[in-house]
Image (cartoon, rainbow, N blue to C red):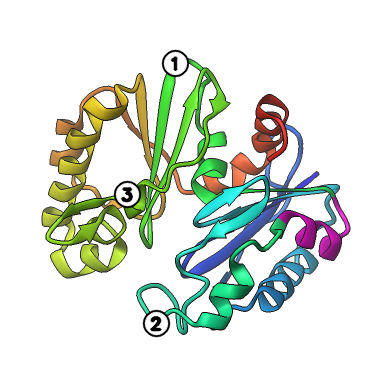
């Protein structure tokens, strides 16, 4: 049994699944608490686990650059009151170099994998055939790349500049979606897809995250047959398959 936790900028969602990926409890979701110290983060995960059936292992997806279970950079959790708010120096110090895998494993008492949240999302949808890119549209932009089912080193594509001084994270993030409305925001998503296509030359692109469902039908039809919309529940279901990725690429 796997406890799968999908950590976002605005919410923490978790459930418990068996080896086949079947949910054994309705997902539990709580708002991401801010300011979010590493200690408060561990408390929140423990509370989620306590509200669910017991598990033998855990998979946790965290936004940002995660290497071998250690947080290199996380954009939202170092802020005063959530995404786009002021960074707090003490929180930056706490999260930079935080060994999340070791800390969560100790707190929950089970073996744990910690990956970027888009990587866990991708684990739930990729087929293992060819080059597969996963982009998650939520608070910002998440990215994960798989080649023949092997998880590639993480790239913080979200921080790359696009135009008008905006990064991908802000250009198609949730704040801009709310400001522009579905139609104009969907056009931006198409521009991003068209711009990235010659960079990755993917065999398949998966668009997931909570805002993928907001893309208008007209834009969806124009994206092409190599682009697939996947449900946001992949961030939970991927918690099981992430253990196969762990064995494929070595220590996560």
Please state, as top left, top right, bottom left or bottom right, where the N terminus lies in the image: top right
Residue bearing mark 3: 213
The residue indicated by pointer 1 is: 130
* Number of the front mark, 3 or 2: 2
Quarter containing the C terminus: top right
Q: Residue at x 17, y 70 (%)?
A: 179
Q: Is residue 35 magenta?
A: no
State the CA–CA distance, disc 3 to disc 2.
29 Å
Residue 233 picture location, percent across and down: 52, 47
What is the crowding at mark 2: few (fewer than 14 residues within 10 Å), some, or many (at least 20)? few
Magenta part of the chain: 101-110
Q: In terms of image quadrants, where is residue 178?
A: bottom left
Q: Position of residue 67 (x, y in %)?
A: 61, 47
Of callouts 2 and 1, the N-terminal one: 2
Residue to which mark 2 is pinned: 86
Mark 1 closeness class: few <14, some 14–19, many ≥20 residues within 10 Å: some
Indicate whether 16 appears above or below 154: below
Q: Secondary structure at mark 2?
A: loop
In depth, the one of 41 and 21 nearer the eye is 41
Classified by dominant secondary structure, the portion drawn in magenta counts as helix
Which residue corresponds to the image point at 79% horizontal and 56% vertical from the top-left? Answer: 102
């Amino acid at each position: 049994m796997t406890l799968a936790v999908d950590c976002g900028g605005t919410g923490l969602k978790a459930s418990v699944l068996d080896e086949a990926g079947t949910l054994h409890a309705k997902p539990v979701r709580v708002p991401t608490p801010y300011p979010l110290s590493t200690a408060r983060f561990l408390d929140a995960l423990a509370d989620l686990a306590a509200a669910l059936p017991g598990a033998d292992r855990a998979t946790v997806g965290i936004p940002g650059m995660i290497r071998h279970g250690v947080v290199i950079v996380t954009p939202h959790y170092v802020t005063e009151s959530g995404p786009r708010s002021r960074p707090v120096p003490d929180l930056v110090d706490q999260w930079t170099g935080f060994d999340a895998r070791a800390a969560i494993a100790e707190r929950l008492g089970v073996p744990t994998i910690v990956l970027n949240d888009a990587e866990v999302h991708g684990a739930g949808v990729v087929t293992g055939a060819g080059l597969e890119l996963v982009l998650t549209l939520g608070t910002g932009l998440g990215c994960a790349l798989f080649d023949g089912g092997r998880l590639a080193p993480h790239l913080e594509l979200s921080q790359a500049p696009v135009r008008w001084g905006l990064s991908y994270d802000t250009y198609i993030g949730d704040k801009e979606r709310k400001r522009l409305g579905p139609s104009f925001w969907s056009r931006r998503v198409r521009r991003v897809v068209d711009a990235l296509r010659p960079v990755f030359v993917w065999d398949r692109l998966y668009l997931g995250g909570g805002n993928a469902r907001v893309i208008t039908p007209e834009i969806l039809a124009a994206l092409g047959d190599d682009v697939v919309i996947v449900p946001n529940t992949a961030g939970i279901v991927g918690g099981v398959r992430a253990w196969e990725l762990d064995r494929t690429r070595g220590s996560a």
